[in-house]
Amino acid sequence: MFEGYRQETVDFMWGIRFNNERGWFMEHKGEYQQFLLEPTKALAQEVYDGLREKLPHEPLMLKVSRIYRDARRLHGRGPYKDHLWFSVRTGEEAWQGHPTFYFEIAPEYYSYGLGFWCAKAATMANFRRHAEEHPEQLLRLARDMERRGHFQLTGPDYAREKGAPHELLRPWFQKKGLSLQFEGPLDERIFRPELAGEVVSELSELVPFYRYFAEICAMDDTIFEKDGK
């Protein structure tokens, strides 16, 4: 059961940011496991269980990230991450182009939401085509999200302007990939057990978006089967 993060959680994350080498990590590995990894796993399990109740027929899977960076992709950085995240999604091992619930904690912020990252260009074209043909569906979702005010649309934009059937949908059409995201500085919420239920409750608002983007992914599968590839 998630009992809240501790001040030691924050202290460890700042510590690994400024002491990103094996010696320091090994000296503080117990703090990592007790104050960062274990509470994140507990939070992840509660969020996963809550989302399974909302999407009982989806083959959802839970993944908690590792603190170790891929040695092939250090690019001058230290061997450890200074943040931890978990995701709830389908898609077996491939996370690209699947709607993904997530939570992340870092030294100075925490965030959670629904991502639809690194989708193929053809998938995003299907998304725009579907939204052009049935704009009322995405408009309803976008207006509801705007009214609630918990999440913001984020993600990289195309360099060239994409036409949209409605002004409210223009930012959506410009995204190469997108995230519906809450992000804020670390506050008292992270230290309370109630955080798990609050995150489940707010992520539940994004279940209609999950279904919407899962439908877009299913269009890819239908095209794939028709082409026989």
Image: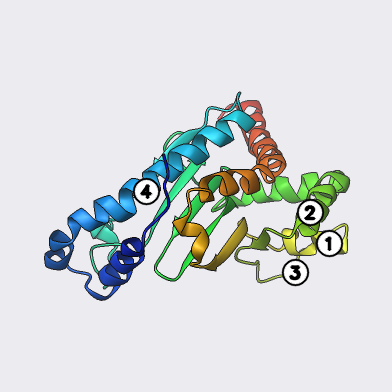
> Along the line of sight, which residue is nearer the eye, 110 or 11?
11
- Mark 4 closeness class: few <14, some 14–19, many ≥20 residues within 10 Å: some
Q: Nearer the viewer, mark 1 or mark 3?
A: 1
Q: Secondary structure at mark 3?
A: loop
Inter-mark Cα distance, 4 to 1: 39 Å
Whether residue 160 is visible here, answered yes or no, is yes
Q: Name the residue beneath numbered marker 2.
A: 142
Give how far across and how far down residue 165 sits, in percent: 87, 57
Is 220 placed above or below 149 here? above
Amino acid type, mark 2: Ala
Q: Name the residue beneath numbered marker 4.
A: 39
Q: Residue at x 39, y 68 (%)?
A: 107
Inter-mark Cα distance, 2 to 4: 33 Å
- Mark 1 closeness class: few <14, some 14–19, many ≥20 residues within 10 Å: few
Of the residues under marks 3 and 2, which one precedes in the sequence? 2
Q: Nearer the viewer, mark 3 or mark 2?
A: 2
Inter-mark Cα distance, 2 to 1: 8 Å
Of the residues under marks 2 and 1, which one precedes in the sequence? 2
Amino acid type, mark 4: Pro
Q: Secondary structure at mark 1?
A: helix
Q: Secondary structure at mark 2?
A: helix
Q: How is the image coloured?
A: rainbow
Q: Name the residue beneath numbered marker 1.
A: 168
Give the position of the N terminus as an image quadrant.
Answer: top left
Q: Are marks 2 and 1 in contact (CB under 8 Å)?
A: yes
Is 17 situated left or right of 93 in this image?
left
Q: Residue at x 65, y 33 (%)?
A: 218
